Image (cartoon, grey):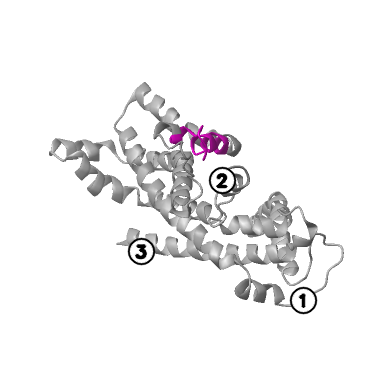
Amino acid sequence: MARKKDVLIKNRNLWGWVFSIQTVIAILVTLIYPLVYAGVLSFTNVRFTTVNFEFVGFDNYKWLFTESAFFADLWVSIAFAVVSTAVQTVLGFLLAFMLYFMKGKVQGFFKTALYLPVILPTAVVSSMWMIILAGDEFGVLNVLFGLTDPPFQWLGDKTIAFWAIVIINTWRYYGITMVIYLVNMSAVPKEVVESAEVEGASRGQIMLRIIIPLVMSATSLNIILSMIGGIQSFDLFYLFQTNGNLTLDLTPVGVLIFKTGLGSTNLRNIYLARSVTMSIVLTLIIATVTVLINKVFSRSEDK
């Protein structure tokens, strides 16, 4: 009997490896190999082709820390990530809290309507907001506020443009934050909320003393996702700089990486190895931020 059990266990382990091998291969091909290859390229002088290149040691890393605009643009990305995360998290929570007390078709209507911006393509979002923020006499905001003579440049000033991009980004993604919060709020026992209401607790007290503590995991998830997305921000900034006259003083590190490695029409200005080097450093920074946020929230949940 003991031998039969050993044979069965071995067969189960064997079939387990057989069924998991495709996942292992997928991870090796799509994750491990690109990371290792990127690490190798960061020590080379490769420009726009990987056919001929030489190893240059840590020259790319020295350039990054001493000559590049990486850290200046990184601060733009971090500032954008922090501000947009704060605004998006608060707004998403308040909207989810509002939906939590709605019922039936009313909740379904508002849930769908509030989530619509999330499913819009980036090109549509950028085109729509370019019309709204256009710095000419036909811009929607300029017409509404009578700022057509001379036309006000909403994207020309760094501070105003920063807040404009924050508003656009929040408008586009608050639906994801809202849905994550609403799913977690739906898991809160209705009896707890109803008992608090019977005892005379206001909506504000229910929110502060019941809902917020019980959806702390959703807050952690939303902040991590928003911070990662904010630090990696690229599409809105690039499209507004290319087609919407967004000031170049507001360039996030993602746009810098793209322009360094691929985004120049002049092949002489393409430095693929430097772009890869910046990507590796940015990945390490994002990983560090994620770990720190997880530690902070794990401690708060323990308390």
- The image quadrant of residue 244 is top right
- The image quadrant of residue 54 is bottom right
| Residue toward you, 62 or 68 | 68
Image quadrant in which the N terminus is located? bottom right
Residue lying farthest to the top in this orientation? 105
Residue lying farthest to the right in this orientation? 52
Give neighbour class at mark 2: few <14, some 14-19, many 20+ (Cα, 10 Å).
some
Of helix, strand and loop, which one carries label 2? helix
Q: Amino acid at mark 2?
A: Leu
Q: Which residue is mark 1?
A: 56
Instruction: Establish if 40 lies above or below 57.
Output: above
Q: Main secondary structure of the magenta part?
A: helix
Q: Which residues are magenta?
A: 125-142
Instruction: Establish if 283 lies above or below 140.
Output: below
Image quadrant in which the C terminus is located? bottom left
Residue 102 appearing in the image: yes
Give neighbour class at mark 1: few <14, some 14-19, many 20+ (Cα, 10 Å).
few
| Residue toward you, 96 or 132 | 132
Front tag of 3 and 1 = 1
Of helix, strand and loop, which one carries label 1? loop
Residue 236, numbered circle: 2
